[in-house]
Image (cartoon, helix red, strand yellow):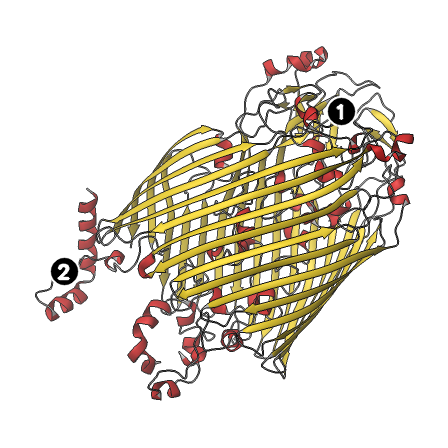
Amino acid sequence: MWRRFGQISAWVILTAALPAFAQTTAQTPNAPAAPAGPLTDDTKSLFSPSWNSLQILGRLSSVSGDPARWQRYQDLRDGLLFTAARTERATADFNVSAAADNVGWRDQRYVGSYERIGLFTLTGLWDQIPQFYSVDTRTPFTSGGEGVLLLDDAAQRAANHNVYPAIAPQFDLRERRDIGTVRVEATPTVALDVHGGFTTTKHTGELPWGADFGFSNDNEVALPYRSRTNDFDMGAEWTNQRAMIRAGYTGSWFNNQDDTLTWDNPLALNDSTAAPGRGRTALWPTNSLQTLSTAGYAKFAHRTQVTGSLAYGWWNNNEALLPFTINSALPQLTLPRATAEAEANTVSTNVNLVSRPRDEWRFNARVRRYDYNNNAPETSIPQYISYDTSLSDSLTGGPHLFAHSRTTFDADATWTGVQPLAFTVGYTNNHNGYDHRTFDSTNENVLRLQADAVGSQWVTFRAHYEYGSRGGSGFDEQSLTGIGEYAEMRHYDLAPRTRNRFVGQVDVLPTERLIFSMSAGVGTDDFNESGFGLQDSGFRNVSFSVDYQLPRGIGVGTTYNYERYTGFQQSRSASPGTQQQDPNRDWTVDSRESVHYVSFFIEPPRIGRNTEARFSYEYAHARGNYFYEVGAALPPPSQLPETYNKLQDLRLDVRHRLSGRLAARFSYQYEPSRIFDFAFDPSVIDGIVQPSSLVLGYTYRPYTAHTGLVGLIYYW
Amino acid sequence: MTKCLECHDATYESGISGTKHGQMNDPRSPVAKLGCESCHGPGQAHIDDDAKGNIRRFAKAGSTAVNDGNGACLTCHNRGTHASWEGSTHEARGLSCTTCHSVHKPQSLQHQLAKTTETQVCVACHRPQVVKTERAVAHMPVREGKMACSSCHNPHGSISNVKGLKVGNSVNESCTSCHAEMRGPMLFEHAPVRENCTTCHDPHGSSNDRMLNVRMPMLCQRCHVATRHPSSVYDNAAITTNKSNRMFGRSCVNCHSNIHGSNHPSGQFFMR
């Protein structure tokens, strides 16, 4: 039938192109009539991306294990699939294009563009991104309206987690983003561009969320989530051959429609001074960020360019503050003010200079500063209600107004006197300032050495070495000891650190069709002055790949990649008092993750004139180990089991020309995934009732999926 | 251009026609300016040359110096997302425009890439980052085709941000352009959250839930070793025998749910 359909299509296009057809036949009266349609150009692979085509496919799959992890950001249910539709019409005056994928499914996407050549371009996008968490989830909570989760009163009164499994039905835990965008870019003159855009993102669904009442009454709920973010931007840019200047505005407004969560206590029906009947928490607050920016560059003699930017941002969240607790049995503390009045502004400046005064020299210098100024009022909250359960004294007296600034100076010099080599020496100084952190400021000096060989036809070589030394000043011991931490703790994001890193890559091209590539990297961060916390971390990776490509899409290639990440940290297990001074209570954990990745693909020659095939296989296997060592005063640890995740992805795709407009497609995908994580393993989360918790039953489970696609590709 | 097509018509037809470079009505396009010579320079010497040299070529590795070839492209591509090229990482490392793009034989439908997809282009040098998007546990939807490297990065550099990030003026401004719920500001803030998302998360993918750099509770215990539960050893007994709610599932954030900041007056420890 499909061949007949192709013959009909060929007849239609032949009729439409009659004059050309007549001319051709007149010139070569004995030549057979070629089938019409884009596929008559048989130098073009059926796997090449192509405008003016669409695919109508039937999808049939079989999955054992966890269907949610298999689908994750996709909708892979069985059914008819209308996808990969691409159309474009180009004339001398305009271009119109449109694309559609997975029409009607949860992960559908549409893109459209209209370009009036030389005047403006209008583009639009609609994209849905699902996120499928689990089908194993169960919950006894039911919706009581916006942001309210209720439990059965009798079950609450029973005050026993074990009554809940019987009233906790299964549900699919999923969320989704719907993103719509419209953009216009216009060119009123040769030198001037103006642009504007609007994006709206709706985020709906449910998330796993911890909603607790204390150490022995921890609950996991499916957090209802509905939000919308609207983003708007506009700007103008003027450019000529010597300079560019632009100015722009961006505004982003996030509106959380479920900005509080109120949920029942599984172990208490009514409020009391021992426990609340329900809890209430604030969720992500509605907020906005607006930024005005300007940027530009100017070109000077000696191939010198100075580029700069300046941006000023306003951050705002002024949501009403919730009362300290919803527990009516507890005293109500006076709110410090009615609304959050959380405000900040940012100032970002960049100046970059690039100069090539001589052919063999390139110089680059950059100064960058970013200030985050917290403008919220000082707030006194000396007491608060912990878990809606008990009155507690604050260790800090209220929120810290965290603020920071970053100043970076970079300078590089590159010498290319021996072609094709380029040698670069660089220096970076990072100077950061902090409010309410353990250090007032940190200062880091970084030396960088690079060697590149990119102009050779046979070999491309890249190497980068970096040595950095970071120190801190203005250490505030009270900021640690005041909240019960050790004075020897150093937070690793600003702790004194020595960094050594090397990454390199060599590509060898014996012929223009064959590429051998090898890359490697190694690096360590030593936190030399950290008595507690992260002591060191490191990475190693090595990669090999071979690619052999012939014309018309024929090729074969393989890749192997190995990564290893390590971290070593130290702590002291102690109760307040003398234990805090006992080094025999110190313990360490050595974290190691290694990952092997292998990929392989074959793009074989055509089978006959009309059949093409592609085969690919990927294998990723990650393993994580955590090894404890403890001091003499602590009991010997029971070591954690190794975690792992393994993903294989085998794909076979066969396409066959049926006519000048039509091709058949058959594809098969085999995707087994194996996973073990002790925190999420079904052997640990063996029900929704845990010793001190009521959870959703969200676990990590393996799956094996077979997916077949059969259908047609139509070209016009 | 007519002269060029006497020898180069096949290349021309397969590459320029229908692309931005071939739009006669766009005064910025090379076709509307000097035709082939807009990019390849004066051609008379090439015509007169028996060996057919004496012309600017844009091969990945060839006779034309990278800066000369790039300079020809930058004559027009000197605005918008390309305005940040000078001083960018890729420029500094000597990449040519034709390392990633092919004007005459593009393999992609958009952006005239030398490979079919963006990922195939980027992986040539950034394999560790691309491989992370294949993690079974937590990854951005790159392998599903919902995102690409350029969703976050501008390969031509960034005037205002670091790491070639194309939105905002800091890592956090880039991340929260999609994850606006975490943006704040909030009443109670968590300092590393405010300063840099990558202190805790690996944006390319991870073997840990929520794309964390290291699993919890170890991640949190890298900064929090105060007395009592933050400094406890959470070993295998904590998970198999005791089933501690500080260990299973979402670990520390089972209780400290608002770890990205709290707007609740009782939210000092991010539990409300």
Q: Residue at x 46, y 63 (%)?
A: A508
| Residue A421 in view in this figure | yes
* Residue B244, horizontal then vertical, whole percent: 71, 25
10 Å neighbourhood of mark 2: few (<14), some, or many (≥20)?
A: few
Which chain letter matches label 1?
A
Secondary element at tag 2 = loop
Q: Quadrant of the C terminus of chain A?
A: bottom left
Which amino acid, by three-letter code, is at mark 1?
Phe
Of the pair A179 and B221, the residue shown nearer to us = B221
* Residue B210 drawn at (x, y percent): 62, 39
Local crowd at mark 1 within 10 Å, few (<14), some, or many (≥20)?
A: many
Q: Which residue is mark 1?
A: A213
Please tell me the numbered disc located at residue B117.
none
Q: Quadrant for residue B37, please give it.
A: bottom left
- Dot 1 falls on a residue whose secondary structure is loop
Of residues A24 and A678, the one nearer the viewer is: A678
Residue at (48%, 62%) from the top-left corner? Answer: A507
